[in-house]
Image (spheres, rainbow, N blue to C red):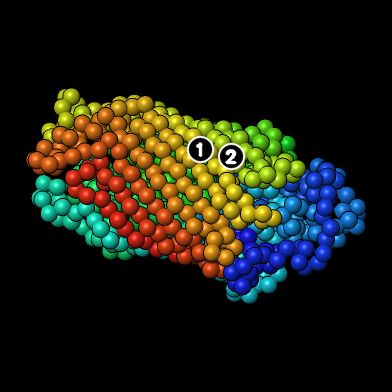
Amino acid sequence: MFSDGSGFEYSAAANQSDRQSPAQAAPIDTSGLWKSEQAFKPVLSAFRVQNQVEESADPDLFRSISDSSAVDTASATSAAGPYKPNPFNLPIPLNRSVWDFNHRKHCDVLRHLKIPATYRRIDTYMRPDYMLPLPKDNSLAKRDQLLSFKGREELYRKGVDIYGCSNLDYLTDVVGNLSTIPVVRGTRGPWQDWQLNINQVIGVDFYSRLVSDTWKTGQIHLSFTWPEVGNQGPVYSYGNTLNPAGLGTRQYQGYFYTDVGRSRDVNSQMQGARLFEYWFDQRYGHKKMSSVRVGAIYPWITFNKSILAGLFGFWAFDEPGVIGTTPGTANGPLVTTAPPGISIEHHFDDYWIAKVMVASGYWDPSGGIDNRRGLNQYWDLNLYGLETTYELTLRGGTYSGNPADNGKPWFVRVGGQYHSGYGLSNLYDVNGNYFFLTGQPRQIYYGNSQYYAMVEAMLYREPGSYNRGLTGFLKAKYSPWDFRGSLTKQLTAGLGYEGIFGRNSDVLFLGYAHMGVNQGVMVRTYNMPSCTQLPNCAVANFQGAFEIGYSAQITPYFYINPKLYYVLHPNTRIDLGDIFSFGIEFRLSL
């Protein structure tokens, strides 16, 4: 689990204004050059490296790609001085060493921690030409990571990368929907109206260069997390007792990305240090772009990825989740699930990417308690089954691997999931009656599926800029089941403007998620005592979530993100009112 676009050398002042272009540093005549094929040959011209979350700008990968193409540096140097011609006047060195790439981590988007940082902060895919170099100044305000020292760089060059993120998220209700009516409130009364999530993530990568000069682009990855909470638990896990399948939560998808906890009875059992991911990865094929990964793999690091969508804190903006983690909800928390399995990513060319992952059907059938330390595996295929995730992506502009395509970045993708293991009905008990009225065990089913699609595009790019401009995304999810899980249709849209208010790397973003519930959830909500015993009970067939936030990059390794949330029809109840909350996030790259 888990750059700044401010310029060749980052500085706090540069973050307040436009970056210094090479034309400002030294006059360069680039007219006509950047469009020519010759201008793209030097050094990194052949580097078409897909920004896998866990690859960390592996120089062995760069070296293997560059070895496969001719490099003509002399002609380009005479034509363009020390910089490589490019349409954005970025200071890209011609004779760039494979070690001249920053180690900045995306702690601002935790699940995409190791997507390499470029001159555009919200680049989901990238080209090494546009990756930020190592900072020339290692002072506290300009370094890539808080703990940056010579020995760490030497260790990385030998083949060991150690990194971490510290995250602190605070949220409080400005307007809540807690009821004073006992049948709605529950027997224990309302819970807290504020929350504090604390997450520590540590990762260690071992590259094959550590043991061999000839074995290229192999990698072993380990990551550890330590989630804790303040005020005893997430505010959105408690309150009105409305959802028996969701442990009494007052809303669907009411978790935030860093929440760890689900009910006041089991919070302490779900927190504490744990092993998160452990896998081996080997790249193969044309220019070593494709890969095979085996081990405990968090699927949404590489599947359905988007830096812009990842800036949002509300769970719905990071959908879809994992089906096989909690039998009762069939859609588990996004942040705790790294099931063991195998994942294959294949690049057909500079534009098309296909992915498939087959994993254990349940990371933890208890929903996060029995396997809270991440050390267990569940391979009873008759009971837990397998979960298969598949995806196809087409990308273009500067998201493509084609060095001649410098248009505005975009991608389109479709994907789906199938879980063959067991789950529990969202409505019926074993006798065909409503389980929340009888207290009897729920019906068991086998097999569940959902499908998703996403498009992201830079809609407007400021003239002459690589990063500044407006980007939007649209996500959709569909599940055909009425009595499995909870959501049947979901549509999510978001916008983000990078380079706002004169701050080159800050991002202002806003979005809306529309979550349509299925028939089982609707029938259950109408027939629960919390509705039937109220004369004015009103139920919607969806829950909505608005989010607006501002992500301020204070230094290359420290971010502050204030946010506002508005939840429409929490838990699909209209009559109990909506929820308006304020939150602030702190992200620190170690």
Q: Quadrant of residue 569?
A: top left
Residue in view at x 30 percent, y 56 percent: 580
Q: Amino acid at mark 1?
A: Met
Q: Residue furthest top?
A: 432
Helix, strand or loop for disc 1: strand
- Front position in the image: 166 or 521: 521
Are dots 2 and 1 in contact, CB under 8 Å? Answer: yes
- Asked if residue 393 can be seen in this view, the reply is yes
Coordinates of residue 59 in the picture (x, y in percent): 71, 53
Helix, strand or loop for disc 2: strand
Residue in view at x 41 percent, y 38 percent: 491
- Front position in the image: 280 or 118: 118
Q: CA–CA distance between discs 2 and 1? A: 8 Å
Coordinates of residue 195 in the picture (x, y in percent): 31, 61
Mark 2: few/some/many CA within 10 Å (<14, 14-19, 20+): many
Q: Quadrant of the C terminus?
A: bottom right
Work out whether 429 lies above or below 143: above
